[in-house]
Image (cartoon, grey):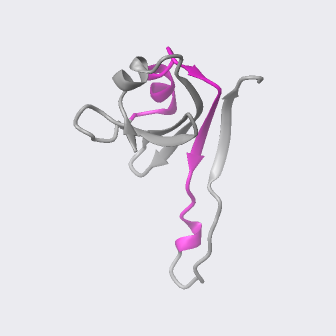
Amino acid sequence: MRITVEQLKNRNNASIELMEILSLEGQSYMARLTVDGQQMILSDERGTTTQFRSTWHAQDMLSSFHILETQVVHLSAYNEMVGMEPSSAEPLRIRVQRQKP
């Protein structure tokens, strides 16, 4: 699912349970938000995924919302090297902030 900043603003008492800032190739980032137990990709009005130039840019854009936890997530390409058996490698997760319940 996708959600825009405007749709977030229109939700009554919207609380973002988890904001995952996903690292992409080319030094850009996208935001995956968990709201009411549902994961949603932050997008613009046309349905295009919003991309950020830094983790700070993503956090700044959503700073007016109540966010319980923020993580930067970086997927590893090391399990995709030529000649290696396929394996699943958990992404690197860095907790940036977390509020006490």
6 or 95: which is nearer to us? 6
- Check the picture and name the quadrant holding the C terminus: top right
Residue in the foreground of this view, choosing between 8 and 25 = 8
Placement of 94 over or under 67, stated as above or below? below
| Residue at (37% x, 40% y) in the render | 2
- Assess whether residue 60 is covered by the magenta stretch: yes
Q: Quadrant of residue 29?
A: top left
Picture coordinates of residue 52, whole percent (x, y) = 39, 34
Q: Farthest residue toward the left?
A: 46
Q: Is residue 40 above or below residue 74?
A: above
Q: Residue furthest right?
A: 100
Q: Nearer the viewer, residue 68 or 91?
A: 68
Residue 52 located left or right of residue 64: left
Foreground of the two, 56 or 100: 100
User: Residue 44 sits in which quadrant?
Assistant: top left
Q: Is residue 93 magenta?
A: no
Looking at the image, the residue that sits furthest to the top is 64
Left or right: residue 97 compared with residue 75: right
Q: Quadrant of the N terminus?
A: top left
- Span of residues in magenta: 52-80
Tell me residue 88's x, y (percent).
62, 70
Q: Judge left or right: residue 27 versus residue 80.
A: left
